[in-house]
Image (spheres, rainbow, N blue to C red):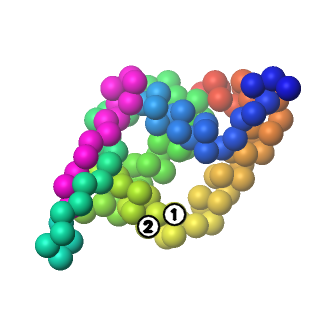
Amino acid sequence: KKAFDNFNTANMLNAFILKWIYQGHVEVIEVDREFWGFGKTKDSLHILSRPQAMARLEEDFFERVEYALAFSDDGYMTEKSFRYYISNYRYSMVGFLDSFAENLSEPWKRKTILLER
């Protein structure tokens, strides 16, 4: 079995985030949060700029990350703000993930779907 056959949606979405970080469009920062006097540090995503020439699925995911920022108090996307986004736009997100997984499940579509603009 080839490594190329081991695609899954979570790995691909994580790869997009890593790509944006590497290209300098997104940064991961630790944000100090205080809740009832207890300090807590959370990793958060901060969008610095919009990547150019993204593939269609990559751009769809980037837009969802941007929308999730609307559920953030400070402009940084945390796991919590992304969960709020998902819970408020559940059907849209499920449709996106189903489409993403379907396109990755067919090897002949992968290159086209991931690279087409």
Secondary structure mostly seen in the magenta stretch: strand
Q: Is residue 102 visible?
A: yes
Image spot of residue 63 (x, y percent): 47, 46
Q: Residue furthest front?
A: 38
Q: Does residue 29 appear left or right of residue 15 in this picture?
A: left
Which region of the structure is painted magenta?
Answer: 21-33
* Residue 84 tag number: 2
Q: Residue at x 23, y 60 (%)?
A: 40
Q: Does residue 108 appear left or right of residue 76 in this picture?
A: right
Quadrant placement of the N terminus: top right
| Residue 101 picture quarter | top right
Amino acid type, mark 1: Ile
Q: Residue at x 32, y 39 (%)?
A: 28
Q: Residue tagged by mark 1?
A: 86
33 in relation to 23, above or below: below
3 in relation to 17, above or below: above
Q: Is residue 74 visible?
A: no
The answer to if 23 sits in the magenta stretch is yes
Quadrant placement of the C terminus: top right
Q: Nearer the viewer, residue 14 or 67?
A: 14
Residues at badges 1 and 2 in contact (C-beta under 8 Å)?
A: yes
* Label 2 CA crowd tier, 10 Å (few <14, some 14–19, many 20+): some
* Label 1 CA crowd tier, 10 Å (few <14, some 14–19, many 20+): some
